[in-house]
Image (cartoon, helix red, strand yellow):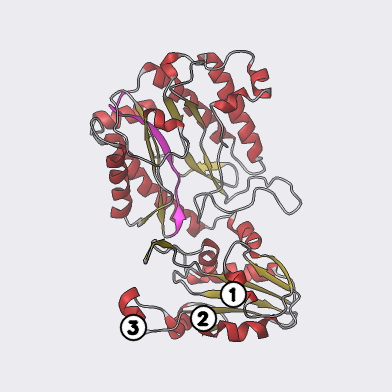
């Protein structure tokens, strides 16, 4: 759990980043229409949540900074018994004042009246260029100061996770572990992909993770060769593999885990050859993770190892160095080695600094490592025994002071572990 004191420290840190005579505004998320008068479940704007821990919509956080003082002002939806009867209780101004360590709290209906005064004399206005808050600001004011993207400031802060953030991510991963182990032990022959998806997501919700971090991928057989396959509607075939990319979100923090498992609990020799190549590459890349390493170095090494392995298995033919130069391996490994993870599964933290230089790995960062090989069933250029096999293995890695910690190391992934769990279900 993350307490109000930590959110307050984040706000104070952000104020330090702001220049004098500036204002920054970040709005909560809005409800999104699903169809006609029904809405998707509400999910708070990640940057707003990062700075407040507040889960209500129709809320606004304002930062004001001058040479003499700085303030944080929170606007919240006012109490309304009629609305609360249908949509649930609100904090309201009085309770929000008690909970949040901000300078002042007002109701959102007073925002338009107050924003003009806040903007007076300010040289710079920060706001999220991708949010609808721009319209709210412009509709209130005739003249705006120089504007900059607020999200860039917050996203840089989000790169380094606190101990409480790491603990929350670990909780999400632990729940995801139970879901993946359930998937391994589940009797899959004669079932459909959506049956397994339901089992996985039941474990999420049963353990207090009320939301998926992303739409689960449960791809049997050749479907695994569609990287973002989410139909999850086909029947499993005995002898096929299943690529499962599924992770839960716990208290707004994500997990992101991929495992590839056999339908019948036993890898064939061809499947094992491909699988162990990907697994060995993943293990080698994870070993490289430590502070001051470039992500692009991990990417380059993963491509070298996978390309060399594909030559040895006959999937690619020729000198692996020349194949790398010609990018022939990209046909079978088209994606990146990993990404930042945190409040969002693809955490919106930068990969380059303000000067365009690549950001080096540092203690407190969390990233995924996820090599893969994808051999489409219609690819006649590769040995027949590998056609229709798609494999990806993904773990969530914390960069530590002297190296790394695999937060998902307890999720089974060796051939022996996976086959053992299924055999002893």
Look at the image and give the residue range highlighted in magenta: 252-266
- Residues marked 3 and 1 touching at CB (< 8 Å): no
Q: Looking at the rendering, in which quadrant would you find the C terminus?
A: top left
Tell me the crowding category of disc 1: few under 14, some 14 to 19, or many 20 or more residues within 10 angstroms, Cα based: few
Q: Looking at the rendering, in which quadrant would you find the N terminus?
A: bottom left
What mark, if any, has residue 136 been given in the picture? 1
Q: Earlier in the sequence, mark 1 or mark 2?
A: 2
Report, in whole angstroms, how far the alpha carbon at label 3 lies from the one at label 2.
17 Å
Q: Quadrant of residue 36?
A: bottom left
Tell me the crowding category of disc 3: few under 14, some 14 to 19, or many 20 or more residues within 10 angstroms, Cα based: few
The residue under the point 37% across, 46% down is 176
- Residues marked 3 and 2 touching at CB (< 8 Å): no
Residue 396 at x, y percent in the picture: 49, 43
Q: Earlier in the sequence, mark 3 or mark 1?
A: 3
Residue named by callout 3:
82
For the image, the number of numbered tags is 3
């Amino acid at each position: 759990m993350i307490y109000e004191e930590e959110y307050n420290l984040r706000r104070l840190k952000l104020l330090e980043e702001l220049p004098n005579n500036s204002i920054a505004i970040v709005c909560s998320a809005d409800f999104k229409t699903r169809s006609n008068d029904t809405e998707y479940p509400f999910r708070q704007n990640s940057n707003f949540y990062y700075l407040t821990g507040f889960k209500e919509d129709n809320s606004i956080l304002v930062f004001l900074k001058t040479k003499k003082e700085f303030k944080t002002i929170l606007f919240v939806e006012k109490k309304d018994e009629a609305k609360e009867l249908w949509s649930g209780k609100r904090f309201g101004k009085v309770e929000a004042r008690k909970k949040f360590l901000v300078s002042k709290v007002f109701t959102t209906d007073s925002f338009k009246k107050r924003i003009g005064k806040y903007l007076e004399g300010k040289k710079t206005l920060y706001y999220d260029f991708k949010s609808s808050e721009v319209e709210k600001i412009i509709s209130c004011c005739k003249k705006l100061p120089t504007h900059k993207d607020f999200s860039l400031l917050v996203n840089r802060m989000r790169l380094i996770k606190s101990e409480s953030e790491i603990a929350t991510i670990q909780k999400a991963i632990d729940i995801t572990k139970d879901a993946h182990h359930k998937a391994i032990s589940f009797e899959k022959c004669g079932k459909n992909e959506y049956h397994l998806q339901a089992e996985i997501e039941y474990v999420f919700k049963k353990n207090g993770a009320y939301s998926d971090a992303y739409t689960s991928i449960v791809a049997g057989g050749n479907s695994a060769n569609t990287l973002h396959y989410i139909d999850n509607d086909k029947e499993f075939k005995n002898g096929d593999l299943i690529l499962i990319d599924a992770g839960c979100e716990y208290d707004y923090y994500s997990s992101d885990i991929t495992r590839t498992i056999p339908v019948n609990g036993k890898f064939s020799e061809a499947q094992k050859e491909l699988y162990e190549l990907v697994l060995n590459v993943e293990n080698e890349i994870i070993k490289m993770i430590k502070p001051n390493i470039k992500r692009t170095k991990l990417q380059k090494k993963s491509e070298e190892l996978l390309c060399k392995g594909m030559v040895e298995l006959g999937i690619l033919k020729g000198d692996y160095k020349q194949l790398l130069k010609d990018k022939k391996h990209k046909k079978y490994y088209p994606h990146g080695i990993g990404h930042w993870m945190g409040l969002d599964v693809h955490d919106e933290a930068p990969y380059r600094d303000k000067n365009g230089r690549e950001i080096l790995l540092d203690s407190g960062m969390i990233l995924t490592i996820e090599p893969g090989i994808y051999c489409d069933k219609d690819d006649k250029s590769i040995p027949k025994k590998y056609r229709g096999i798609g494999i990806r293995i993904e773990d969530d890695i914390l960069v530590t002071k002297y190296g790394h910690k695999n937060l998902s190391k307890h999720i089974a992934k060796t051939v022996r572990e996976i086959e053992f769990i299924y055999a002893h279900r």
